[in-house]
Amino acid sequence: MWSSRIAFIAAATGSAVGLGNIWRFPYITSENGGGAFVLIYLACIALVGLPIMFAEIVIGRRGRMSPINSIRELTTASGASHKWAIIGVMGIVAGFMILSFYSVVAGWTLHYAFHYFQELIGTGASITDPGATFNSLLGNVGELTFWHGLFMVMTMGVVGLGVEKGLERAVSVLMPVLLILLLILLGYGMNTGYFHEAVGFLFKPDWSQVSGSMFVTALGQAFFTLSLGMCAIMTYGAYLPSDVNIPRVGVTVAGADTFVAIVAGLAIFPIIIANNIDPGSGGAGLIFTSLPLAFAEMPFGIFYGMIFFILLSVAAWTSSISLMEPATAYIVEATNLSRKVAALLVAGLGWLLGLASVFSFNLWSEVKIAGKSPMDAIDYVATQIMLPVGGLLIALFAGWVLSSRITREELGEKMPAWAYEAWLWLTRVVTPLLILVVLGGILNLF
Ligand code: PHE
């Protein structure tokens, strides 16, 4: 059981805030042309993310077990089919797939932290051409594999040993520091003279650019960044004390996550524009090729860069723990393996699958799956398809299968009547329809 409301908020925010906000959000916003995409993304957070966030916490807290068994328990209580437990199975698979490439990108972050450390103590060269530095990292299979492996071991350590307590305490200090660093970077961005352009790029919609795939990407990002659709938040909800107000913590977590993404965007895009980089140029390397330009110029930039990438690694760490947790918890429940062995198994397999992402940039750079690199293909299937499908089923389950007596107790008594009605109808009808329309778009049904 979490010791308090704050402990849950720290853990859930730790899960939500990560590479999704600071690496993925800027780069896919860039690839999707800014403004219109950001607004669609924010709409997805409000209309799809928030209702599902509430639903996952309610299911977790009522079930009080790992997702598959929580759902099974709740179906028994409401006389529904046990097949709903497929939500948990899919979540485990999606989490595992995301973990595989997440760890590779977190490895880049660790590498950059180490790079700045070496530069600081005078044993490393400075980054003069960030694009070239990044590309040479991508070409170095050994280096990529090492940092990916190190990050996986770090994640496994926490999940296997269950040292969440210490981590929880560390996180509640380090995450605010990361936010302060982002705000300082934002201040730097404001002084570049290109802040206005950046705001325009991020928030001025060019509706002529809107395409179907933009909706698919925005919806996927809403799930990814809030850690939804794969039962991570549900798992954390299982340890939430009964008297905590779910709507309030849900809004806090989603609000904090969205705030960090927007601040990250506002901090990064002025730097990009000021350095004559096309803000629409995108690419998974976006923050790694743009931020070093700022660190090279700022006072104490080397030190600052080191701390920034260390904290970003920590943010990624607290997210990857929640990616690994559902699969590990399930193996522990379903087999007689110990927690340590289960974590080792998940980490080992995740590391192996992650090699596909490592090789995407070098050995397998010619390999394309439906036009995408192996890493992009894994990301696409997990984030853009599996998370929304999981979310769809979670919404339907919470809206139609869970008795409204339960949701009324868990949510209705904690918020104004209109807000509860709004949640109920969003969850029952609006959210599922929105997800179906977007997924239908993938299949070219419309
Ligand atoms: N939300 C995390 C991030 O933004 C990633 C994540 C996705 C974590 C799904 C858990 C589950 O970085």
Image (cartoon, grey):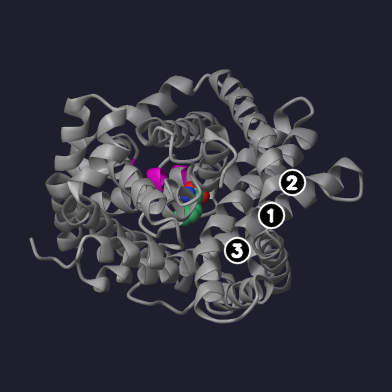
Judge by depth and name the residue closer to the eye, 38 or 437.
Answer: 437
Callout 3: SS: helix
Total tally of numbered discs in the picture? 3
Residue of label 3: 104
Residue 194 in view: yes
Q: Earlier in the sequence, mark 1 or mark 2?
A: 2
From the top left corner, tell me how far across and down residue 159 is, in percent.
64, 61
Callout 1: SS: helix
Q: Nearer the viewer, mark 2 or mark 3?
A: 3
Q: What is the span of residues highlighted in magenta in the rendered image?
A: 26-33
Q: Is mark 3 within 8 Å of ligand 1?
A: no
Q: Amino acid at mark 3?
A: Val
Residue 281 in view: no
Task: Report whether 311 appears left or right of 105.
Answer: right
| Residue 185 in which image quadrant | top right
Task: Report whether 411 appears left or right of 103.
Answer: left
SS majority, magenta: helix
Rounded to the nearest angstrom, the CA distance separating label 1 from label 3 is 17 Å
Characterize the local packing of mark 1: few (<14), some (14-19) or many (20 or more) Cα atoms within 10 angstroms.
some
Q: Is mark 2 within 8 Å of ligand 1?
A: no
Task: Report whether 419 appears left or right of 311.
Answer: left
**Residue 338 on the magenta segment:** no
The answer to whether the residues at label 1 and label 2 have Cβ atoms under 8 Å apart is yes
Which quarter shows the C terminus? bottom left
Residue of label 2: 127
Q: Residue at x 28, y 35 (%)?
A: 39
Q: Amino acid at mark 1?
A: Thr
Residue 133's tag is 1
| Residue 299 in which image quadrant | top right
Rounded to the nearest angstrom, the CA distance separating label 2 from label 3 is 21 Å
From the top left corner, tell me how far across and down residue 168 is, in percent.
65, 43
From the top left corner, tell me how far across and down residue 279 is, in percent.
44, 39
